[in-house]
Image (cartoon, grey):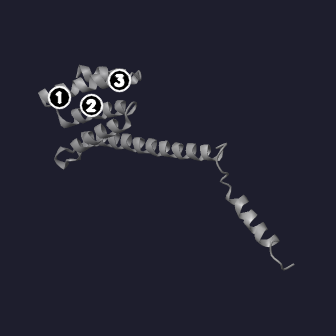
Amino acid sequence: RCHSRLGDFLQLQERYPQACEEFERALEICEKCNPPVREKAVILLRLGECQRQGDKEKGKKTLLTAKALLDDPQQRDEDTDDVLAAIDEALEDNQAEEMNDQVKIIQQMMASTARAPDGPTLSLGASTSAKFDKATLGSDSK
């Protein structure tokens, strides 16, 4: 329990690597003393949130592990519902961050293509107009 609280404190200070270490120690102790599922899920939730700061996939995997603990209907009660809701929210945040990252990549690709100094211009309007002008001006009917 002390490691979990210290992890919470470090997480609030945005000292994520140290917080991860404390949450991992708390999980090691959990394996020995077999606490309620809710307590272990909360530690996994906090660990996953911290891991996301450095490794989004690792954080997501930890959050999914926490969710799996509470998805069992036999383990569910009013006390676990709030934890499950927090896990779901963290997973949604993770998904939103992934989508934002993908949008940024696409925007960067588009920007680099548009300003490529040696590459061809990708203006479809100009090439279509040029083809139209050539076809119109080259015709014999006037």
**Residue at label 3?**
17
**In the rendered image, which quarter is residue 125 located in?**
bottom right
Q: Is residue 28 left or right of residue 136?
A: left
Closest to the observer, 37 or 99:
99
Residue type at mark 1: give it.
Cys
Q: Position of residue 118 (x, y in %)?
A: 66, 44
**Residue at label 2?**
43
The residue at the point 21 percent across, 28 percent down is 27
Q: In this view, does 54 lie to the left or right of 109?
A: left
How packed mark 2 is, by other alpha carbons closer than 10 Å (few <14, some 14-19, many 20 or more), is many
Sooner in the amino-acid sequence: mark 1 or mark 3:
3
Q: Where is residue 65 in the image (x, y as percent from the top left)?
A: 25, 40
- How far is disc 1 from disc 3 in space, using C-alphas? 20 Å
Task: Give the answer, above or below, for where 69 lies relative to 33.
Answer: below
Closest to the observer, 44 or 138:
138
How packed mark 1 is, by other alpha carbons closer than 10 Å (few <14, some 14-19, many 20 or more), is some
What kind of element bears circle 3? helix
